[in-house]
Amino acid sequence: MKLIVKDGVLRNIETFSPEVRASQRERANRKALYSPARVLYPLKRADFVPGGTGSTEGRGKGQFVRITWNEALDIVASELQRIKSTYGNAAIYGAADWASIFPSFHHVYNMLYRFLNLFGGRTEYRTFYSNAAISTAWPYSLGSDFSTNDPQDILNNSKLILFLWTDPAHTSTHRNDNHNNLWLKQCKEKGIKMIHVNPRFTDSMAAYGDKWIPITPGTDCALMAAMAYVMISENLYDKNFIDTYTIGFDKFKDYVMGVEDGIPKTPEWAEAICGVEANTIKALARDVATIKPAVIWQGWGAQRGAYGEQPVRMAITLAAMTGNIGIPGGCLTQGPNNSNSLRNVAKMVGGIPVPPNPVNSFFPIALFPDALLHPGEPFKWNRGNYNFPNIKAIYYAGFNQFNQQGNLNKTIEAMKKPEFIVVNEPYLTPTAKFADIVLPAVHQFERNDFLGFYKYLIFMKKAVEPLGEAKSDYDIFTMLAEKLGFKEEFTQGRTEMQWLEYLYSQSDCPLSFADMQQQGYYVFNKPTTTVIGFANFRNDPTGKPLDTPSGKIEIYSDRLAALNDPQVPGVPKFVEPWESRRSPKASQYPLELITPHPRYRLHSQFDHVSWIQERIKVDGYARLWINPMDAGPRGISKGDVVRVYNDRGETLAKAAVSSTARPGVVILEEGAWYNPAEPGVAHTVDRGGNPNVVNHDVGTSQLAQGPTTHTTLVQVTKKEA
């Protein structure tokens, strides 16, 4: 973005260059900067009493009083010190997220975790809401190597791309380094066949796809098992690759062919489960097996459901069966690796160093409500047995818990448990409303930083002075560290600009620091070679083995089989979700809800901005996509206000009657700010259209304990006036 500032006020945002265009969302930062939701002064919950003896019932009501910075810092420092002294550092939970994931120095993860680790440590979360199942399950099949082919290689060599629950044209608009829309257009022009398996008719399918295969949520493994059945029964799989590079295929074959359980995983078997016609499954299997080289693009959608680890390992197995690993044009990917991005061209400007966490205390992030409500109780994660910590304080920095966490009414109860909650935030988010102290953080335009992406290193010069009394996270933690006695250790004697100069000196940029500030950016040369994921393993499986126990692709995992858990089998399988249209609960809640990412928000960011609201909402309501076959019998027409509910909660939306959703599936995009009829009170109607009111907080399985926001049954009815 190129910022136009006059008289100290941001007047306009222009695109940086034709090659890296500023999106509508990025341009909306002009409204976000001056949003009425900005926190301009330190705030204290009106009924908050320091010391751990006061009531927490006022949390969530949004009733605050303005206090001075010195008062706020004194309270935060004394509360953190009190809790540390009374309960130990494991009682302090720190959470940071997307608010500033891209800047280097002001990376909010590094800032918060440096501060808390120097203070003595913290309880941390494991995995992310985004990709918990895929990041945990993948290593059991492929080891720690997540490499993939870059876009240019796919464009040059691939003949087919199978998109599984992914919509890159829609959801990757924040990833300018991939230029996905332009790249997908080029793939289309090149004649690469693109098939989309998704419960939703996606933007990627509409603009560039060749075939849409609508599937019932939670049944991807049934589809892929049936594809494997076709490949095996018709002798279409790559036996040489299986024999050379994998172990355990015989056990997987026994499952697929019905030797193990007496149920052959035929296309007809799968049709009854996933709603895809048997002939369509057969044709898909033949295409994927015979059109080579091919890409299996495994999105992050399917793994956000019950037993989400299974589609991850099943897709890896299909890639192995077709030999599409480690060759030009053939790969398994979660999105092509851009070898031209700065991180692969040169050493970027790094973030502020984070010392090790002295405390070994954690819980899987999706189990947040149980962690707070049931301290000391056991939980399982990634083949280990643990106990929930006893959380007494939470420090959030740029983390909107109420956007990411399933089962918000249970989350509200959990948020009442800690003795103290402090939040660094530019905006009064739904999560900030549950804080006892809110510290006003600056917008990214109100600070200096570096950003590396694509082939650019950019100096993000402070464009305007901070509004009100807002301060950077670095300044906030510096002041707190001074109160707590470790300022010099935290700052190492450096100001913001001194840190930037120090970190810049370790990068590969040849410009002087002064010249870089003046010029504003530097362009690195693109590499001329393309990257092929797993090429070393493919070329030399003995000399360059994977870091799995066998050194090979483990279709069967001894480590997982040893759990003796049918929800985490040794080979990937279809495991019936606990909540689906086939479960008894469907008689009461017959529609399956999915919650994809929105185009005009980045999760919950920008939901409060008027320009974005005009794009994504109707009269202030979020949109619920519902198929005409489901809307008609319910008397629902386009624009009607509808109730979306189950026994976990209720939210309101406006109906968008459309065949975008397959019959039996409704779509409510994630990210809308929670807006309850009675703030701070659980089990009231949410008017904001936040799907987490009705979503689960149950983990995928004991392996990853990932979020299951795509395993949700609801009923939808027209709201009476």
Image (tube, helix red, strand yellow):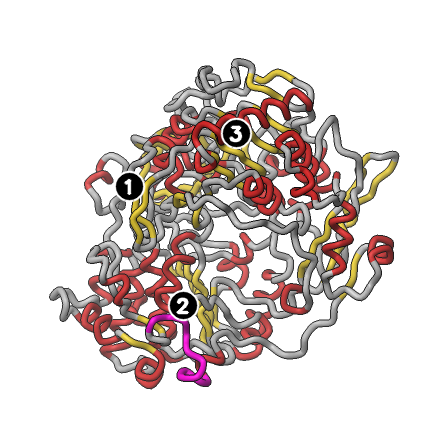
Relative to 42, 701 lies left or right: left
* Label 2 vs 3, first from the N-terminus: 2
Residue type highlighted by circle 2: Gly
Q: Residues within 10 Å of mark 1 (few under 14, many from 20)?
A: few
Residue drawn where x is 28% and y is 36% of the image: 589
Can residue 100 be seen here?
yes
Q: Residues within 10 Å of mark 3 (few under 14, many from 20)?
A: many
Based on the picture, tell me whether residue 548 belongs to the magenta stretch: yes
Cα separation, mark 1 vs mark 3, equals 30 Å
Q: Residues within 10 Å of mark 2 (few under 14, many from 20)?
A: some
Camera-near label (1 vs 3) is 1
Question: Disc 1 designates what residue?
Answer: 378
Residue drawn where x is 87% and y is 54% of the image: 518
Q: Residue 560: percent from the left, percent from the top?
A: 27, 61
Can residue 627 be seen here?
no
* Label 1 vs 2, first from the N-terminus: 2
Cα separation, mark 2 vs mark 3, equals 38 Å
Based on the picture, tell me whether residue 506 belongs to the magenta stretch: no
Residue type highlighted by circle 1: Pro
Question: Disc 2 designates what residue?
Answer: 143
Query: The C terminus appears in which quarter of the rendering?
Result: top left
Question: Disc 3 designates what residue?
Answer: 430
From the viewer's perspective, is residue 634 above or below residue 509?
A: above
Relative depth, front residue between 553 and 377:
377
Residue type highlighted by circle 3: Pro
Residue segment shown in magenta = 539-549
